[in-house]
Image: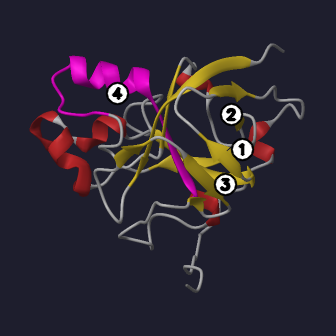
Amino acid sequence: MQTAEGRIEQLSVSPGGVPKRAVTEAVVNAFGLTRDRQRDRRHHGGRERAVCLWSAEVIDGLRAAGNDIHAGAAGENVTVRGLDWRRIVPGARLRLGDQVIVEVTSYAAPCKTIAHCFRDGDFNRINQQVEPGRSRLYARVAREGIIRPGDQVLLEPDDAGDRASRVQPRTLRWKPPAE
């Protein structure tokens, strides 16, 4: 199988909540981008939701349909351009730049905090159950490192055959690391 390739369009962080703002470089560790924080740690963050990924093409389409959305507005950390977003599913592994590898763990459910980004407040436009292929995705970090906008993004071939067998759904209980 041939490897699919894209690029990091934007990296985004915040001190908590949305929108997240663009940065020129990010150190990625097991808990995500080191300068990023989540306001609601019950629903966001932790090792299984360390990085939130989204497609620049999906954002472009939503904006063209009259939604006031841009990279980072919906809380994603890594905005990617050039990948067929429908192929990025739980179990998929992405190489970000030369160092970082992430494994997609789940679709990110949208919530009311991003309603202002959508025409008539309908944030379900990016709900995987309502609009398949438009959702943001959560990923765990398989290999730490540094990433930058413009870095190559590779969807690694699925040698194991069945991605779903590698990622088992489960209830996540996360406690922030001691600071």
Q: Which residues are magenta?
A: 50-70
The answer to whether 125 is drawn above or below residue 26 in the figure is above
Report the Cα–Cα distance between label 3 and label 1.
Answer: 11 Å
Q: Report the mark closest to the observer, 4 or 2.
A: 2
**From the viewer's perspective, is 100 left or right of 76?**
right
**Residue 100, disc:** 1
The answer to whether 4 is drawn above or below residue 120 in the figure is above
Quarter of the image for the C terminus: give it: bottom right
- Looking at the image, is mark 4 or mark 3 earlier in the sequence? 4
For the residues labelled 2 and 1, say whether their Cβ atoms are less than 8 Å apart: yes
Q: Report the mark closest to the observer, 2 or 3.
A: 2
Sort mark 2 into few (<14), some (14-19) or many (20+) by Cα contacts within 10 Å: some
Q: Position of residue 4 (x, y in %)?
A: 70, 18
- Looking at the image, is mark 4 or mark 2 earlier in the sequence? 4
Q: What residue appears at the point 54 percent right and 17 percent down from the top-left corner? A: 82
**Residue 59, disc:** 4
Q: Position of residue 71 (x, y in %)?
A: 35, 35
Per the image, is 164 magenta?
A: no
The answer to whether 27 is drawn above or below residue 2 in the figure is below
User: Which amino acid, mark 3?
Assistant: Arg
Report the Cα–Cα distance between label 2 and label 3.
Answer: 16 Å
- Looking at the image, is mark 1 or mark 4 earlier in the sequence? 4
Sort mark 4 into few (<14), some (14-19) or many (20+) by Cα contacts within 10 Å: many
- Looking at the image, is mark 3 or mark 1 earlier in the sequence? 1
For the residues labelled 3 and 1, say whether their Cβ atoms are less than 8 Å apart: no
Report the Cα–Cα distance between label 1 and label 4.
Answer: 24 Å
The outermost residue toward the left is 120
